[in-house]
Image: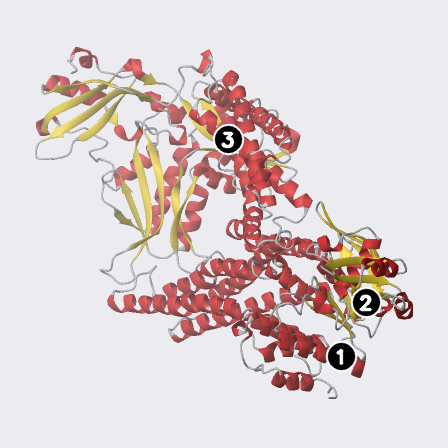
Amino acid sequence: MIEVKGVCKSFDDITALNNLTLNMKEEEVFGLVGTNGAGKSTLLRIMTGVLEADKGEVIVDGKQVFDNPKAKENIFLIPDDPYYFPNSTVSEMMGYYSSVYRKFDKNKFSYLLENFDLQGNRRISTFSKGMRKQLAILLGICSNTKYLLCDETFDGLDPVMRQAAKMLFAKEMDERGLTPILTSHNLRELEDICDHVGLVHKGGVLLSRELSDMKLNIRKVQVVYQNEEEQRKAESHMDILLHENRGKVHTYTVRMPEAELEMCFEHVNTILLETLPLTLEEIFICETEVVGYDIKNII
Amino acid sequence: MTSRTSSKPKSSQTYITRNRIWLISLMTLIGFLVYVVGFLLKVRGIKHSMEISSPTYLVTLQNDLSHNIVTFLGGNRISTVIAVVFAILLGLTSFNYLYKSKTIDFYFSIPEKKMSYFRDVCFNSIMIYTIMSVAFYFISILFSAIFGLEFTRNVVVNIVQGFVSNYLLFLAYYGICILAQVVCGNTFISILMAGFFAVIELAIRATVGYMSFTFFSTYSSFANGSIPLMDNYVPVITSPIYNTLDESFGTSCIHNLLIALVTFVLTYFAYKNYKGEFAGKAVVYKGVRYFVKVCTSFLAGIWAAMLILMVVSYDYWNERIPYTILGALLGTVIISSICEIVFALDIHAMFKRIWQAPIVAVACILFCISFYSDWYGYDSYVPDKEDVVDCAIAQHGEADYQYIIREYSGQPTLDSSTAVGYAAEYMHLPYTDDVMTFAKIGMETACQGASETGYSEEYKDSYIYNAEIIYRLKNHHVVHRSISIPAKMDANVLNAIIGSDEYKYTSFTLDNFDNWRKLTGGFNSLSFASCMDIKMTDEQIDEFEEAYRKDLKHFNYTVATENTIYGNVTYEKRMQVEPGDEYEILFSQGFPVYESFENTIAFLQKYEMYDTWEIIPPEYDFINYVEIQKEDETTYDAANGYYQQTEGTAYVYDQETVDAISEAVVPAYGNGYNYHWHNPSLYAGYYIYYHIYDEESNRAFALRKDNIPQVLDNLEYQ
């Protein structure tokens, strides 16, 4: 488990992190969301020991991470713009990583290279940005670390590669208990892979919750009423978080169990009644309104 | 897919070396061009030159080859430059990864101790230099051996010393460069910082030296390497090349090793505290920023003040202060602003912390005033007797001898010494009351000469000798002062000093005369005035030396100032490899002959060297006319002993006048000569030229002030 306890970090006059506390459980995909400048990358770098917190601490499996090789052996950072040795080939970088990460699996790496259509003897300087990110993901996975921290890694990957990467993560989680921690400013990017989501804003945590918990009591329903009387009848029994209407079509986001929602419409005459799937963004909007933030302005 | 235990991983050195392949290639290219191509071309040139011209005593194949290898491999030579270049190249690229977030993310996130990578990089740099220098030294030695160089003890010692000296020089500069790297977050700024570290101490020393030179009347430029205010030699700390060039082998090695150790330790701690967020900044540590800003703005303030004074006027104390204030403020404000711009990498930061500039300006002003008013007592310093071991005194100018240097390069080289340098090395005068009086008057007169009011009434019309006094103190300091000795001061004091055996036998470099002429081979040659060189035996030279020493026995200040000088005996030790070959001068020394030097004159007469045309005026029958140039007495500069304007020239044809003039003339050699305390004001403002039939050049003579023939008053000068 990664425990972030009261971490503060400033750069000159700018406060990047302000008493931030988070826990990241093992074998869960943790998504860290926030706008540009929210502090996501800073937090990731503190978690990997690149930066040292001004206050607070980051504990990885019970060990302080800063300048601690033992703790860092379990963490691999994939930055948004990965670095490779000048003029190096894929094989040379693999050689380097295998020398610093003792559990690096060269066979797996060769296998994955082939599947991702990357050549081992090709110079990385000839790769596109997307290919460089792909390579970083493969190196990270094959390093066999317990935690894989990905800083906006999926941005810049094509949809096919994105899907392939997600499948890889899932496979690694299943086989050896990998714990990916992903940051993004794109909620849609994370919603089909994350188990737990944390929203960071202005150096602090606005929200940190299991995705399933968030989806449990929130519903989205689309209704067309026969008349206004029926509308009033239905609305009086619903716990409405959000209401939009376009002409006669009303779309409600409500916080109530499914059974209760069905009962609301039992005696209401409707022309159309349909339950719609919720996006992560919609969940966030609802949840953050509670704490007084207009999430549309944040994301 | 199961994981397999990796085969033994390559060491970090492999990857560090691989990442430096471009740098290593560049260094190899430089080394190849210098040590292989350059070296071979030079050696080939030597062989070729030996093939087409005969060797001489000084120029032989062995000598030239050994000189060549020492030129390349010895300390203070080409290899020294290469060592510095390699140190800068390796040093300023060692920690470039600290300057970008991307590379910081990479290196700081991998599971390695932060400091282990630091050690790996330093070790890699040192290893690269070691391998390259050993390889290039080996190649040069091999080439020399192939071309026939004998590895004498001298050559081997030079090579070994050169290797060690350059290695430590490399370490010292490497340490300075990596320190610059880890206190900065930007490549360009780190280069500036390395330059700052390398020159700041020299800049401070130069500033103190300049201020001392300009404002201390008794400042001596002969006190090589000392800081005037400390009056002692203090090794330069942050410029290792200066130590290497200026100090002995052992001392420079110790100093450079210390520099290397200190810089490595400082770099270690700076790297340890280097934070990931420093990447991209200019200077990352506040303390370093303050240090750089204070030093640069302080020096800028002083130099701005000096520049303004140079343009306006140094002369008057009252005027100096306003210009000093102006210059100090301008310099500090401008440089402080520039520093802030550089630190923030933003021009809008120019007024940040601008309040610090006036504070530094005040320090500049006080510093300048301390020199204007001599707060240090520099110009009045005369040590107490109990503090002094002994001393030396010398007039400014060249020493009378030139000698061979053999010990360093393996090839004999002719070199000369200043009189002060010679005295500093060989003269040990007891520090008597007379010397103290001499020093006090000398200091006071020097100060008067530099003051607005000039020399005192007592010495206003006196010739002034420029001299140096060197105190060797019991605390091992060696103090130099440039002093001005008025010819009119108490002759008893001057006689006691100048007439002492220790002074005169050292001043006339007689003590070394035997050492050099008996050590070398070759033959002796003596000449006097226009007399041709005469080959002499060792016994004849012994005879000359005995005669000269006898004459010196009676030499003192009174003799020096009251006797004209007839000319200079020049001794040379010459060498010919084969008869008929051109000879080379191995050693030479000059001996001025005063009119009272009876024994020396007798020796010259014995060997028919005396009756030259410089000594005896020609007979009337040979004279076409006599030209008399008269100087304007009103323009006589007593202190410097010369006339600033000529009144006119007269021409004499009649025998009576010519004979009267010939009766009075003295050799012109001493006119204007002030060495060995000879007094130019002995001579009148007349230059006498005898124009001889059938000769293109004339023969020059002088007149003494106390013996001007009356006939000259009747001439018309136009």
Whether residues under marks 3 and 1 lie with C-beta atoms below 8 angstroms apart, the answer is no
Mark 3 and mark 1: Cα distance apart in space: 70 Å
Q: Which mark is residue A270?
A: 2
Say which element carries label 2: strand
Residue with the mark numbered 1: A170
Residue with the mark numbered 3: B304
Scheme of colours in the image: secondary structure
Q: Residues within 10 Å of mark 3 (few under 14, many from 20)?
A: many
Mark 2 and mark 1: Cα distance apart in space: 42 Å
Query: Is residue A240 rendered to the left or right of residue B693?
Result: right
Task: Tell me the kind of residue under disc 1.
Answer: Ala
Which chain is indicated by disc 2? Answer: A
Q: Nearer the viewer, mark 2 or mark 3?
A: 2
Say which element carries label 3: helix
Q: Nearer the viewer, mark 2 or mark 1?
A: 2
Residue under the image location 40 percent in, 62 percent down: B67
Task: Tell me the kind of residue under disc 3.
Answer: Ala
Above or below, A203 relative to B398: below
Q: Nearer the viewer, mark 3 or mark 1?
A: 1
